[in-house]
Image (spheres, rainbow, N blue to C red):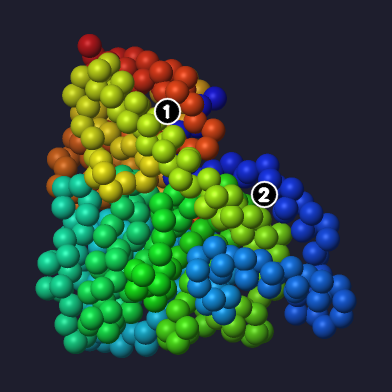
Amino acid sequence: MIYFDHNATTPVDPEVMVVVQEALAQYWGNPSSIHRVGQKAFAELEKARERFAELLAVSAQEIVFTSGGTESDNMAMLGSFSATPGDSVIISSIEHPAIKGAAKKLETIGVEIRIVPVDQDGRVALSSLEQLIDDSTRLISIMSANNEIGTVQPVNEIGAIAEKRGICFHSDAVQAFGKVPIQIRESGFSLVSLSSHKIYGPKGCGALFVKQGAPLTARTYGGSQEFKMRTGTQNIPAILGFVKAAELAIEKMESEGKTLIALTELLYEELVKTVDGVVRNGDSIHRLPGTLNVSFPGASSEIVVPALDRMGICVSGGAACASGATEPSATLMALGKNREEGVSAIRFSLGRSSTEEEIFIVVKAVNEVVSRIRGK
Ligand SMILES: *Cc1c(COP(=O)(O)O)cnc(C)c1O
């Protein structure tokens, strides 16, 4: 089996597994209980929060643990301003469905959603962003890196614009975290969404960075956990596993990044050499190291993905969240790609275990499958 779908999810790192297992056995107490069993769990939870904050170079009071990227995105979109008719929110045209879905919800209560376009490589045009801002703008939400094409946004520049206009800046950094450097303070972020399972941690766990003083209404009520922002007994094993995963990812980021850039470039070169009409999607410089998105016009990803799966190769067409849909990828359409390119895009997302040997096997398989579908 070859797994080239790390942007959908990653296997849990063995070191993380040890931490989770130990936490299940040792720290099962309710961290809100005042007795020793509870306080033992509480101490570990707060130690993890401190460590996580240290990794992000922020303070522990600014970390709210959540159930994952989707919840963090929804909290930021729906809870960072009072949402009254006439307000406006700016998002990019290639946001994750968690942001797009929350934006739809805001529209139902009269909030205007303004979409900032991206260029042909998926980068937000700063001049377009500036033009969309006015006195009604309450929030700018632009992802740090895209899950489908891997394009990394100029977040420092976007943050500077937001700061100058005094507008709250949220970024979905789920894909960027642990893969490319994130500088929360320097980028002027007020809110940042993070998730555990994209960085070899357990699923159902994530975090929202909430800048000191940034307004945020509670997601749940009753209880005082997570600074009353997200109440309910915390999932300590998952949180400790997430923090361990973050530690490992940041530690390995530079060396792993170099390896993954080399592997994805090799994959691209070999595909171009072997398969006709390969179209690269996304920015080839400002990108996540492990992501390569290419279209094979004439070979629909709906057919290519299951065919590769039968050969033991796991990849995605468009986003995993959109699988089963016959529509072309909305992200690729936003890049100005044509419909054929949109329906034939394959996302190869490599990870920690990926090898050169796997690249050659995948290229051979892709060539066989694509040629067969094209009828050559
Ligand atoms: C996976 C992903 C999410 C959702 O995170 P979950 O933890 O699965 O809810 C949000 N945004 C991006 C960019 C993602 O890749």
* Left or right: where 194 falls relative to 188: right
Between disc 1 and disc 2, the foreground one is 2
Residue drawn at the location 33% of the way across and 79% of the way down: 168
* Left or right: where 301 falls relative to 338: right
- Say if 103 sits above or below 147 in the image: below
**Does dot 1 land on a helix, a strand or a loop?**
helix
Which amino acid type is shown beneath numbered disc 2? Val
Give the residue number, with chain letter if any, for mark 2.
16
Tell me, for residue 315, which label it has, or none.
none
The percent position of residue 73, horizontal first and vertical second, equals 43, 67
Say whether disc 1 or disc 2 marks the residue closer to the N-terminus: 2
Residue drawn at the location 57% of the way across and 47% of the way down: 200
Badge 2 local density, few (<14 within 10 Å), some, or many (20+)?
many
Which amino acid type is shown beneath numbered disc 1? Pro
Residue extending farthest top? 376
Based on the displayed image, in which of its 4 quarters is residue 161 positioned? bottom left
